[in-house]
Every structure is written in C-alpha cells, then in structure tokens.
Amino acid sequence: MKISVAGTGYVGLVTAVCLAEKGNDVTCLDIDEDKISLLQKGISPIFEPGLEELMKKNKDNITYTNDYLKAYNDAQVIIIGVGTPEKKDGSANLKYVYEVARQIAQTVEHDCVVIVKSTVPVGTNDKVEQIIRENKKNNIFIEVVSNPEFLSQGTAVKDTLHATRIVLGVESKNAESTLREMYNNFNIPIVVTDRRSAEMIKYAANDFLALKISYINEMANLCEIVGANIDDVAKGMGMDPRIGDRFLNAGIGYGGSCFPKDTKALHWLASFNDYELKTVKAAIEVNENQKIKLIKKSRKYFDSFNGLNIAVLGLTFKPGTDDLRDAPSLVNIPLLIEDGAHVKAWDPVGADNFRKLFPDEIHYCESIEETLVNADICFIFTEWTEIKNFPLNKFKKLMRNPLILDGRNCYPLTEAEEAGLIYESIGRKKVN
Ligand code: UGA
C-alpha cells in the first residue's frame, strides 16, 4: 500500500517505520527541515530502541520529505500523527491536526482514507472530516478514520509491531476494509467501533493507567503513615487478575508526553460539557503533590539546601527515552537551585536535552561516580538500569553524607541498610 504519514514524532515515525517493515511503501512528512535532513541520513531524531535499525533495514520503502504535495499526491492512506500539545487551560491544541487536514484537502486528487492517529478529543475526527469536505478541490471521496496509538516511549517499536489491540473508529465498511488491509500482516486483534468511541478509548485507557499510578502512590503514602510496605501491598493486589500487577510501581509520579496531557485534556473536555470527572481530577492532584515528595522527605534531614552538594541521578520521565516532558526532575531541580544548592546531575541519554533548558545552573557528569563525589544528598528521579545496578557500597565511599532519596524504589531496603546508607524511598518499610 502507498501510505503517507504526517509528523515524525514518536507516533508518526514509529508507525511509518513499522508499516514499511510490513511491506508498505511509506512517505514521512514533517515541516521541520532539520528533522527531515537527519532522517534522510538514516538518523532518528528521537531516541527509541530498535528504530534506527528498522529505518536502515527498510530504507528502500521509506521516503522522507518536507513537501506535502509530494507526500499526499498518490497516497492511498494518509496518517495524521502530528502533536497535540497542551494549551494553557489544559485542553489539547489541535491546530497542527487541522492544518494537515486542510493541506490534504487542497492537495489530494483521488479517493483516499485519512487516519487520525494523534491523540485527539472526542469529536475531532468529525471536525477533520468537515475541514476536508469544505476545502477539497475535486469531487473526490475522502474518509476519515480514528485509529489511536497505544505505544509507550522506550518500547515503541515492539509496542507497535506486537500491539495488544488495534482500534478502528470507522463510519463505513469501505474505510474498515482499507484499514484491515493495511494491518493485514500485523496479526493483532482488531476492535472496530465508531469514531467517537475510538477517540474516547484512547483517553479512557491512558487516564485509567494514570489513575492506577496515582492510586498506588496514595496507597504508598498511606503505607508510610500506618507502617505498611507498598511492595508487598502491590504484590498482593496485583496477583488478582482483575487488578493486574503492571503499573503498580509507586514513585514520584507519572510524567511524559501523554498521561499529564491526556488527563488534563479529558478533564477539560468533561468540564466543557458541564461534567466533573472527579476520579481523573484526583489523579492529577495526587500526581502534582507526589512529584515533590522527596523534597518534603528531605526536610527531616535539612531545613534548607543552601550550600549543599546535591547529586541527581536520572533526568528523563522514565528510562529508555531522552524525553523530559513533565519529568519530575523539571519540578525538583529548579526548587533545589532556587534554594542555593550546588547540583550535579547524570542521565545516560537525557542530559543533552536538560542542558538546553539549564545550560549553566547544573554541572553535568559523565558517570554516576563523578556525580556522587562529595554529595550531601543524592536524589534518584529515574530508574535507569545503570542506577539500579550501581554497587550500593560506592554511595558511602563517594558521598560526604550518604543520604539517598530514591523516588523510584531502585534498591532493596536491607541492602541499602547493610551498605550503611540513610535511605528513603516511597511507601516502603523493612519486613522482618
Ligand atoms: C503512555 C501509555 O503507557 C501508552 O500506552 C500510550 O500509548 C502513551 O502513553 C501515549 O499516549 O502515547 P508513555 O508515556 O510512553 O506511554 O510511558 P509509560 O510507560 O506509560 O510511563 C508514563 C509515566 O508513568 C512515567 O513517568 C513512569 O515513570 C510512570 N509510571 C509508570 C509509574 O510511576 N509507575 C508505574 O507503575 C508505571
């Protein structure tokens, strides 16, 4: 099939490369010239395991361009995978989606199917269809399909090639059969529904996962108060298949480009329709408080950070990505700096992006060891494998004061104690 994909971010680029892997002829379009020139050289502008290898393997089936006329001209399917960033009021900014819809309408001269893959509020697909109808220059038939994406950053390629389900929100049998043909080789269960329900599935799924995280974080907070251990509580809960054991890791809250944005967008949509989404509102509030939990814990040891040497391990919102969007580090580090701390930080892939935001205020280190030298406190914001595997006895050897505030529960409590550390994590206590 001839497929064009607008947007080369996590959703657009990964989808495009995986569709090429399944034998389609794919064109990737982006307005960002730098991104396209990197892609043309075989370099992925995003850090995503396995992506560049697949780009290389399928290079004869993928074209990268800034020219939308070229991209849309003869495509049978056009996928919209552009960003829907958060607006100040929490709603999703749809201007990029609508701009692509207008360009498609003004360019395409043959029947085709337009797929909206970007995460968009309920009713957006209808609006995309309306824009196309009002702007198309020929008497052609363009159908719009909602086909939300469920990939996670860091495992995006695997999540796309082996997705748990494909959701198709269609308004006609013709559109359904085109999409079934496109996904023919994927061998993944397909859920067919109408467009509005498909749009809703994406938000409902993401917000449920965000709620699950906020729920376990609240349970962890309560465990600390009543003297229980969240590790065991989560294990005991998760063995019930109705609950499931995933997304029950307590910590300093969720970040990333999706949960924070999608919870706020759904909450906004409900409010706009005069309905208060109380559970989602609670998930958002719990998460905001959770992000500064380690700072609150540190008050037990220091009244102020002024003049202290602080080591920060992990900057990204989760391991396996260089993405910093809504990462807890972005909330905590400015608080430390404002209070007069000397901050040294290490992250295996996120440091360069962090440096763009804080070029001079932080000393960026090449290794965990270098970060820890002479530190009074070590904050852990991301559970990178390198951090989890770091020998605990080195903390004591390298730091001036071995106080570890671990926001991702990286180490067993007994081992931390045996290594002579003052170790604070989230919701845990030693069980004899
Ligand atoms: C999320 C969803 O998991 C995907 O299914 C969805 O497709 C994607 O959003 C999207 O809408 O595009 P992602 O944001 O890449 O994926 O990352 P997650 O692995 O879901 O992690 C999000 C945040 O939750 C991270 O900050 C992570 O540290 C945190 N988290 C996750 C926890 O604090 N505890 C957990 O148990 C799990």
Image: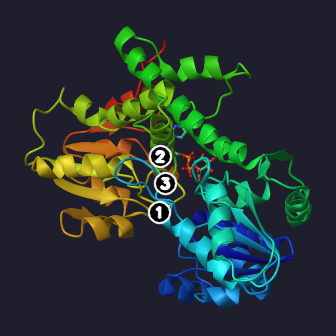
Vertical order, 196 against 104 (above or below): above
Vertical order, 145 against 306 (above or below): below
The amino acid marked with disc number 2 is Glu
From the image, state whether disc 1 or disc 3 is nearer to you: 3
> Residue 190: where, in percent of width, then height?
85, 48
The answer to whether one can see residue 420 in this image is no
The colour style of the image is rainbow
Which label's residue is closer to the chain start, 3 or 2? Answer: 3
How far apart, in angstroms, are the residues tagged by discs 1 and 3?
A: 12 Å
Q: Is residue 408 left or right of residue 43?
A: left
Q: Is mark 2 within 8 Å of ligand 1?
A: yes
The disc at residue 383 is 2
The amino acid marked with disc number 1 is Asp
The disc at residue 257 is 3
Vertical order, 420 against 18 (above or below): above
Q: Quadrant of ligand 1?
A: top right
How far apart, in angstroms, are the residues tagged by discs 1 and 2?
A: 13 Å
Which label's residue is closer to the chain start, 1 or 2? Answer: 1
Residue extending farthest top: 226
The disc at residue 99 is none
Residue found at x 39% / y 37% = 252
> Residue 152: where, in percent of width, then height?
61, 52
Q: Name the secondary structure under disc 2.
A: loop
Residue located beneath label 1 in the image: 322
The answer to whether one can see residue 109 in this image is yes
How far apart, in angstroms, are the residues tagged by discs 3 and 2?
A: 18 Å
The amino acid marked with disc number 3 is Ser
Q: Is mark 3 within 8 Å of ligand 1?
A: yes
From the image, state whether disc 1 or disc 2 is nearer to you: 1
Residue found at x 48% / y 54% = 257
